[in-house]
Image: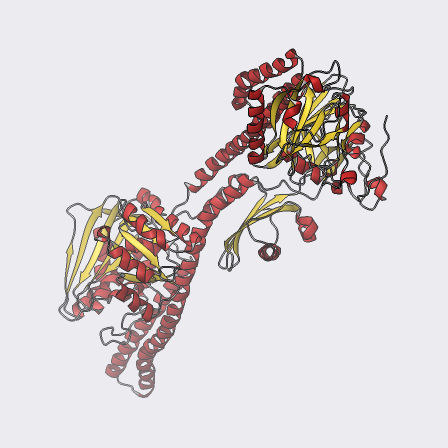
């Protein structure tokens, strides 16, 4: 048996120039000839065993039989291989007069372009049975086995059929299908073998077993045969050194000799012959089918080429099955995600949905934890890393090339992750600049793998001769994989991106609500200061008469004066008591300290009690008050004292803000399971811009007006809070200053209605046939706007290129259009003019949006033809108000 040679002039296996070995395996013959005149310039030295005389210098066509059709076909074949850069099969008949006595004239051959020469490789023609047996079996495979692949549920099942097919064709002792991992290590996923052969099933092979340059050749040359590791090579003559020519490129050769390192690798497995078939998909090496034999074994050229044809089928069948399995997984995940997303609505935001269905949500991505992070809110589910550590990982991902960021070995870069047991993370940003993101986590998983060879067989620090030696041991050792999680795959990323759209909408909505809340807090701060000034004023008013009265009582003795002063003190103390009681009521309700006694009550009885409470105020201003009751006595479910307080406060408010001899009308009507009481006056009315503030704490419309005649302005706040405790609603309408006001209170008529109305939320009605179009160069923002609009039941179209907007507008025919002002190529001002000139623009509303909201932008938008200008980002309420 040959020994491994030591005289290599390269440092590492991957440096070996295996594509230019300057020799071929001597079971075939090589002839290379020039492009121009087809003169033979290089041959394998074993050609002298079949040709009687030297053929170098001869025209290649002259060594063939005189069949003119064959020569014409060959010339066409030369053109094809030059154009396509692939290897093509041919059959050749050599000229008998040029051959040694008894040599065959019929040969199977391939021809290819080596860059400087046409190369023809010849092998003796095979037996009839071998050729047609292979062709018949391949036909049977394609007609009977391949159609069953659809029924197979795993890659392993399909791969087993493939290796069985190849073993039948080659008759070799063992055939394995070896699939590459991302690091080019590989795993045997299927095997067919003789019973007495050692099994390689499920074994892992290190990447070093197949060096990089070998993998590159496998993508070019899909079949490679070593019929006998002891077969002596046939050198190319004349040699490159003797003639000064370039070394002949044998990348597409069937006969190319193998590296001595590779031949020794085969011998070290106890084998004498090997045959490999590449599996290539989308130009990348998917895996190999590797055939092993303990004795010398020649496989005819045409059988090998039939296997090459099969390898193309195998490659695409395996890829299709992988994609089918991935799609099945995605469909299951999508179904779970859809079920979760169906629960999301105005009263059930995504934050509540994911928390209530935590396990199902995490299972959608086979995760142990999840974090949604924004400036305003953090949602955490399951087992996660600390937020600050996640933000550090996020920052590093930004600097290292972006998102989605996945890492299944966090312990290497972030040792702190080990104490939390989190080895895997996937981060996808919502707003990268703001560092808003979602993150998914996977725990460390311990896996045991079986690897071929000794665990520490090679080292990069070993001497050159050691590093160049092929694997000598094929014993099996186990390796426990620690510190890693299951990797996040493409399906996981797609699912996370889908969920991220919903979180993006949620983040925009939360940001808008927080923006509004900040404005409201600023407004409330102003109201509070005004309220405190009013409170001080209102408390001083009764305090003055009380203090003066106390001084008078100290100095007078007559009963008449004492009675008069005592009455004044009592009235002012009663007024102070009411102010303090109102404040205490608001405080108790806000802190949840009010307990209501619910019962079924007559609404007429409740209103009668309320009218008695305010009778004096109404009479003092000579108001005309009418109550329009229903013919039937309708019930309401609530606390009698608090309901009387609600309506007495509203009627008192109407009397207070209506000039003398005004009119107040109280109407009762029934709407389904709700009773509606409206109180309408013809008083001073409410400006449109203040309607939304009427029920706010510390608010008093025209607090310093002569109309108000005292008070703290918290009566309607009490009304709002008490109505909410009854699961009802209160609203106010007014056409403006001096046009009166109407307050409406909706209350449940029964306990059942009360319970059903607990989470009822009345939404603005958006016409379902509305169509809205958004144009903005920010794709994520466009996506979010469309999702917001579609969640309201309208059709939405998002366009990111203003150049495409005109054709899209004509085809979509929207009712509403939102245009960004600052877009490249065509800005919003120019685009709206172009769109409004179209006949399809009749009755369409156009709205501008930008990050600026100054008066200049508002005026510029109006001048350009927009109906209104909005500041980005658009909120759900803004879009809804337009569509409504």
Q: Give coordinates of residue 794: x percent, y percent.
A: 31, 46
Q: Is residue 453 above or below residue 142?
A: below
Q: 23 or 435, which lies in front?
A: 23
- Closest to the observer, 33 or 518: 33
**Can residue 64 be seen at all in this image of the molecule?**
yes
**Residue 698: quarter of image:** bottom left
Residue 277 left/right relative to 676 = right
Q: Is residue 765 above or below residue 172?
A: below
In-front residue for pair 425/368: 425
Does 863 sit left or right of 470 as displayed?
A: left
Residue 644 is at least partly visible in this image: no
Estimate the x, y position of residue 543 in percent, counting from the top left. 34, 79
Residue pictured at 31% horizontal, 53% vertical: 880
Q: Position of residue 384 (x, y in %)?
A: 60, 49
Along the line of sight, which residue is nearer the eye, 691 or 812? 812
Number of dots carrying numbers: 0
Percent of width and height locating residue 10: 79, 43
Residue 877 placement, left or right of 393 = left
Most extreme residue toward the top, as rendered?
Answer: 129
Q: Residue furthest bottom?
A: 555
Up-down relation of residue 201 to residue 766 (above or below): above
């Amino acid at each position: 048996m040959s020994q491994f040679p030591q005289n290599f002039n390269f440092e590492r296996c991957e440096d070996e120039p295996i594509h230019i070995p300057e020799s071929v395996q001597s079971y075939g013959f090589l002839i290379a000839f020039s492009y121009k005149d087809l003169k033979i310039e290089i041959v394998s030295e074993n050609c002298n065993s079949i040709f009687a005389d030297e053929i170098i210098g001869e025209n290649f066509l002259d060594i063939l039989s005189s069949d003119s059709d064959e020569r014409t076909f060959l010339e066409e074949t030369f053109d094809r291989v030059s154009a396509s850069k692939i290897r093509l099969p041919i059959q050749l008949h050599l000229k008998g007069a040029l051959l040694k006595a008894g040599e065959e004239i019929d040969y199977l051959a391939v021809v290819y372009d080596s860059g400087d020469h046409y190369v023809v490789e010849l092998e003796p023609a095979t037996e009839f049975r071998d050729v047609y047996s292979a062709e018949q079996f391949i036909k049977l495979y394609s007609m009977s086995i391949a159609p069953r692949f659809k029924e197979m549920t795993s890659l392993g099942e399909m791969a087993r059929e493939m290796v069985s097919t190849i073993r039948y064709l080659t008759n070799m002792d063992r055939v394995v299908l070896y699939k590459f991992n991302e690091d080019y290590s590989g795993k045997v996923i299927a095997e067919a073998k003789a019973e007495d052969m050692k099994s390689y099933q499920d074994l892992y092979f290190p990447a070093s077993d197949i060096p990089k340059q070998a993998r590159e050749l496998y993508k070019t040359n899909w079949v490679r045969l070593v019929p006998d590791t002891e077969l002596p090579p046939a050198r190319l003559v004349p040699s490159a050194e003797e003639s000064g020519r370039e070394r002949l490129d044998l990348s597409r050769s069937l006969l190319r000799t193998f590296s001595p390192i590779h031949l020794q690798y085969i011998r070290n497995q106890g084998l004498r012959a090997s045959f490999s078939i590449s599996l290539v998909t989308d130009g990348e090496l998917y895996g190999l089918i590797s055939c092993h034999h303990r004795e010398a074994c020649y496989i005819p050229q045409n059988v090998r080429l039939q296997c090459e044809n099969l390898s193309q089928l195998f490659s695409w069948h395996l890829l299709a099955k992988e994609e089918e399995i991935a799609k099945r997984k995605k469909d299951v995940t999508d179904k779970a995600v859809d079920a979760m997303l169906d629960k999301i609505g105005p009263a059930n935001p995504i934050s509540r949905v994911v928390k209530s269905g935590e396990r199902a949500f995490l299972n959608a991505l086979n995760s142990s934890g999840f974090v949604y992070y924004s400036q305003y809110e953090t949602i955490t589910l399951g087992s996660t890393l600390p937020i600050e550590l996640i933000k550090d990982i996020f920052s590093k991902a930004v600097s290292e090339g972006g998102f989605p960021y996945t890492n299944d070995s966090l312990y290497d870069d972030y040792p702190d992750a080990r104490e939390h047991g989190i080895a895997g993370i996937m981060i996808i940003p919502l707003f990268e600049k703001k560092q808003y993101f979602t993150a998914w986590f996977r725990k460390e998983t311990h896996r045991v793998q079986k690897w071929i060879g000794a665990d520490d067989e090679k080292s990069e620090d070993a001497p050159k001769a050691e590093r160049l030696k092929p694997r000598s041991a094929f014993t099996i050792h186990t390796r426990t994989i620690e510190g890693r999680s299951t990797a996040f795959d493409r399906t996981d990323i797609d699912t996370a991106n889908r969920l991220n759209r919903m979180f993006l909408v949620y983040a925009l909505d939360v940001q808008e609500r927080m923006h509004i809340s900040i404005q409201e807090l600023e407004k409330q701060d102003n109201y509070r200061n005004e309220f405190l000034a009013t409170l001080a004023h209102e408390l001083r008013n009764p305090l003055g008469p009380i203090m003066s009265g106390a001084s008078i009582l100290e100095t007078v003795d007559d009963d008449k004066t004492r009675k008069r002063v005592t009455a004044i003190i009592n009235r002012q103390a009663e007024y102070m008591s009411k102010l303090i009681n109102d404040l205490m009521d608001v405080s108790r309700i806000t802190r949840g300290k009010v307990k209501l006694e619910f019962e079924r009550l007559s609404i007429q009885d409740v209103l009668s009690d309320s009218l008695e409470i305010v009778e004096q105020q109404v009479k003092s201003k000579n108001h005309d008050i009418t109550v329009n009751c229903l013919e039937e006595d309708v019930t309401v479910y609530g606390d009698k004292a608090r309901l009387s307080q609600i309506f007495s406060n509203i009627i008192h408010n109407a009397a207070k803000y209506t000039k003398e001899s005004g009119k107040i009308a109280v109407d009762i009507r029934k709407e389904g399971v709700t009773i509606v009481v409206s109180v309408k006056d013809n008083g001073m009315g409410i400006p449109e811009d203040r309607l939304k503030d009427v029920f706010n704490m510390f608010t008093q419309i025209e607090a310093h007006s002569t109309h108000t005649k005292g008070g703290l302005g918290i009566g309607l706040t009490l009304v709002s809070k008490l109505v909410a405790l009854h699961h009802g609603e209160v609203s106010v309408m007014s056409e403006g200053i001096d046009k009166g006001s109407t307050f409406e209170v909706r209350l449940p008529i029964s306990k059942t209605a009360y319970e059903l109305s607990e989470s009822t939320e009345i939404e603005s009605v958006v016409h379902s046939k509305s169509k809205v179009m958004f144009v903005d160069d920010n794709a994520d923002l466009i996506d979010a706007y469309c999702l917001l609009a579609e969640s309201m039941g309208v059709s939405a179209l998002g366009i990111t290129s203003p150049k495409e907007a005109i054709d899209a507008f004509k085809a979509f025919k929207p009712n509403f259009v939102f245009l960004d002002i600052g877009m490249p190529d065509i800005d919003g001002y120019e685009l709206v003019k172009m769109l409004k000139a179209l006949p399809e623009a009749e009755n369409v509303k156009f709205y501008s949006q930008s990050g600026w909201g100054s008066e200049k932008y508002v005026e510029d938008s109006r001048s350009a033809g927009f109906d209104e200008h909005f500041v980005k980002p658009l909120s759900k309420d803004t879009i809804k108000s337009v569509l409504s």
